Image (cartoon, rainbow, N blue to C red):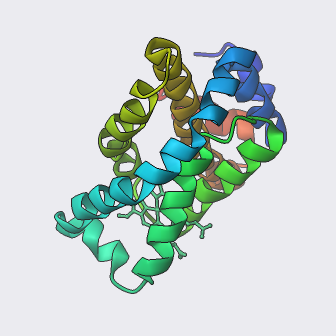
Amino acid sequence: MSQERSSWLIKDEATLTELVTLMNLSADETTVMQELQEAARVAAPEMTKAFYERLFAHEATAEYLRDVSMDRLHGMVQEWFSELFCGQYDADYARRRMTIGQIHVKIGLPVRYPLAMLDVVMPFGESVAATYANPALATQAFRKVLSLDVAIFNQAYEDNQLKHLAELVGGERLARRLLTGT
Ligand code: HEM
């Protein structure tokens, strides 16, 4: 594949603002999320409990949690869940979520694990959405915001891989071409 893609030219900060634009959250959707934040805070401890039960039940993921403060992590994942419902999805929000992705890159965690954890996060978010007067709108809003988070998390991994491959082969375009496998 030799064709250049315009998405290849979108980098760093611009990737974040692009993703926020792509999700196209309406004012109604952001309002719903904000109105649900208190319910999300209430659900967060239970979500976090299920989250770490899942990770501790699997040796390859439990290994990452041995030498860290679980009290701190419980608090941070609760905060992460509540912040999904903050109602303001701008570049600052995207940057905060990107930093979380980068922290996971740095500990050498394969991206399949955070992605697989959506199986735990999704039903808790949907239960929160179901308490809203218009559950269909709330569910739609929650799914958009969670998808945004997944895209940003994944972007942290891709940025890192591309950066290192580009350094190795002497340029990002060549690195991108190599990654297409052609
Ligand atoms: C949906 C998926 C995930 C979310 C939302 C998430 C969220 C977070 C957050 C918010 C932090 C704190 C970051 C900070 O210090 O500011 C964190 C740190 C951490 N997470 Fe995750 N996490 C996810 C998946 C995982 C998985 C699958 C593992 C490992 C099995 C993991 C292991 C860790 C570890 C070890 C830290 C501490 C890193 C350090 O301080 O050195 N996370 N995570």
Query: Quadrant location of residue 11?
Result: top right
Seen from the viewer's position, the closer of residues 109 and 34 is 34
Residue at 75% across / 34% down in the picture? 15
Residue at 30% across / 40% down in the picture? 119
Residue at 56% across / 35% down in the picture? 36
Q: Is residue 138 visible?
A: yes
Residue 33 vertical placement versus 3 (above, below): below
Is residue 49 rendered to the left or right of residue 106? Answer: left
Seen from the viewer's position, the closer of residues 177 and 104 is 104
Q: Position of residue 125 (x, y in %)?
A: 42, 36
Is residue 59 rendered to the left or right of residue 137? Answer: left
Q: Is residue 5 visible?
A: no
Q: Position of residue 155 (x, y in %)?
A: 61, 41
Q: Residue furthest front?
A: 133
| Quarter placement of the N terminus | top right
Q: Position of residue 47 (x, y in %)?
A: 36, 52
Query: Quadrant location of residue 25?
Result: top right
Is residue 153 rendered to the left or right of residue 116? Answer: right
Residue at 45% across / 84% down in the picture? 69
Query: Quadrant location of residue 74?
Result: bottom left
- Number of dots carrying numbers: 0
Seen from the viewer's position, the closer of residues 2 and 80 is 80
Q: Position of residue 132 (x, y in %)?
A: 48, 24
